[in-house]
């Protein structure tokens, strides 16, 4: 009788476990909670978005579970904003091979912002250097990437149909310090976008490669003929161009100031803008004087 009772108890316990099914992971609960949060279209940078990103930040301490949960959710998530934010969580918090594999798949997403988040995330995992600002000042020595083998995917992303995604891919390639990246940066000197060509040329100077110098000189001429107020990225391009000229020639005409759009003291902005104009003119005068060498001197 006792044996029968024990057997019956085991059957009940096992049937109860089978009915309950596998337990949802903590990461799965976080992703589920995130997907149920409001995603108002008119609140792209507001409190609702901050609340969603704060929720996803809870995945940081559980990388394996989190990648599995996001990987399970992505195929069923139709909202591009949600897919982009999930991609952002992968790139921001989860630097693993599994996370990188999901981001590589998202490079084919139909939404440009999702692809952009994927490119940025892969940059964080593939980079070997930490360079900041328009001058690309290096902070500390180079280091090993979080995930190996991502350069071919970033090369593919450099052909994205959206201009800013191509530029983002060039940032990522420049940060990899990989010889294959140099080849793609040279390829982008033929890009249909003059802005992409400029970024490629400037990034090449970080490898002491001057093959983009003609494009940089063309950009100098364009900037000097452009009204800054008609180009929101005028000073960003100017800062990068001036720093790249210094890097490849070893010559300086004085300190390159902060991008005036980033200045916290509006009273300083007119003086900063004037300084940029002075530096651009100084480089134009120097290039006009500098004797041509090599192929440039050929008749």
Image (spheres, grey):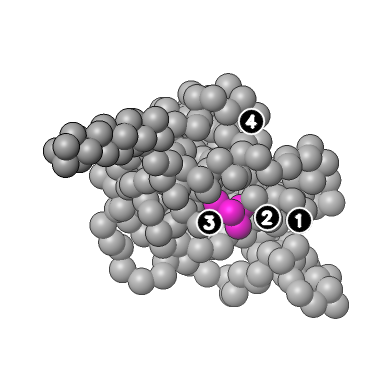
- Foreground: 187 or 146? 146
Eyeballing the image, is 40 above or below 137? above
Q: Residue at x 41, y 35 (%)?
A: 20
Alpha carbons under labels 1 and 3: distance apart = 15 Å
Alpha carbons under labels 1 and 4: distance apart = 19 Å
Q: Dot 4: what SS?
A: helix
Q: Quadrant of residue 269?
A: bottom right
Q: Residue at x 68, y 55 (%)?
A: 51
Is the C-beta separation of discs 1 and 3 under 8 Å? no
Tell whether position 92 is magenta. Answer: no
Q: Position of residue 294 (x, y in %)?
A: 37, 42
Mark 3 Cα shell of 10 Å, populated few (<14), some (14-19), many (≥20): some
Q: Residue at x 76, y 74 (%)?
A: 264
Alpha carbons under labels 3 and 2: distance apart = 10 Å
On residue 51, the disc is 2
Q: Mark 2 or mark 3, which is nearer the start of the sequence?
A: 2
Is the C-beta separation of discs 3 and 4 under 8 Å? no
Q: Which residue is mark 4?
A: 80
In the rendered structure, the answer to whether residue 53 lies left or right of residue 265 reads left
Please state the extent of the stretch shown in magenta in the rendering: 53-57
Mark 1 Cα shell of 10 Å, populated few (<14), some (14-19), many (≥20): few
- Foreground: 190 or 15? 15
Q: Which residue is mark 1?
A: 47
Alpha carbons under labels 2 and 4: distance apart = 18 Å
Q: Which residue is mark 3?
A: 57
Q: Mark 4 or mark 1, which is nearer the start of the sequence?
A: 1
Secondary structure, magenta segment, majority class: helix
Q: Mark 4 or mark 3, which is nearer the start of the sequence?
A: 3
Q: Which numbered mark, 2 or 4, is in the foreground of this view?
A: 2
């Amino acid at each position: 009788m006792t044996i029968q009772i024990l057997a019956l108890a085991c059957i009940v316990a096992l049937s109860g476990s089978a009915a309950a099914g596998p337990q949802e992971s903590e990461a799965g609960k976080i992703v589920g909670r995130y997907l149920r949060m409001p995603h108002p279209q008119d609140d792209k940078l507001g409190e609702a978005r901050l609340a969603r990103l704060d929720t996803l930040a809870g995945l940081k301490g559980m990388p394996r579970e989190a990648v599995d949960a996001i990987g399970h959710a992505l195929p069923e998530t139709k909202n591009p904003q949600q897919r982009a934010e999930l991609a952002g969580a992968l790139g921001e918090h989860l630097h693993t091979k599994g996370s990188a594999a999901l981001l590589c798949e998202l490079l084919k997403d139909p939404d440009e912002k999702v692809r952009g988040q994927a490119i940025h995330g892969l940059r964080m995992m593939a980079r070997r250097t930490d360079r900041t600002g328009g001058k690309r000042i290096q902070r500390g020595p180079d280091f090993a990437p979080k995930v190996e083998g991502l350069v071919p995917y970033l090369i593919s992303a450099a052909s994205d149909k959206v201009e800013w995604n191509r530029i983002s891919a060039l940032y990522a390639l420049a940060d990899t310090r990989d010889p294959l990246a140099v080849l793609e940066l040279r390829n982008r000197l033929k890009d249909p976008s003059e802005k992409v060509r400029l970024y490629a040329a400037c990034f090449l100077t970080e490898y002491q490669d001057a093959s983009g110098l003609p494009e940089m000189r063309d950009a100098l001429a364009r900037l000097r003929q452009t009204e800054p107020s008609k180009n929101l990225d005028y000073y960003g391009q100017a800062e990068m161009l001036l720093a790249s000229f210094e890097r490849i020639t070893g010559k300086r005409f004085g300190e390159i100031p902060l991008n005036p759009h980033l200045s916290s003291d509006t009273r300083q902005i007119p003086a900063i803008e004037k300084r940029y104009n002075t530096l651009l003119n100084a480089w134009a005068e120097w290039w006009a004087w500098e004797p041509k060498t090599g192929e440039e001197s050929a008749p």
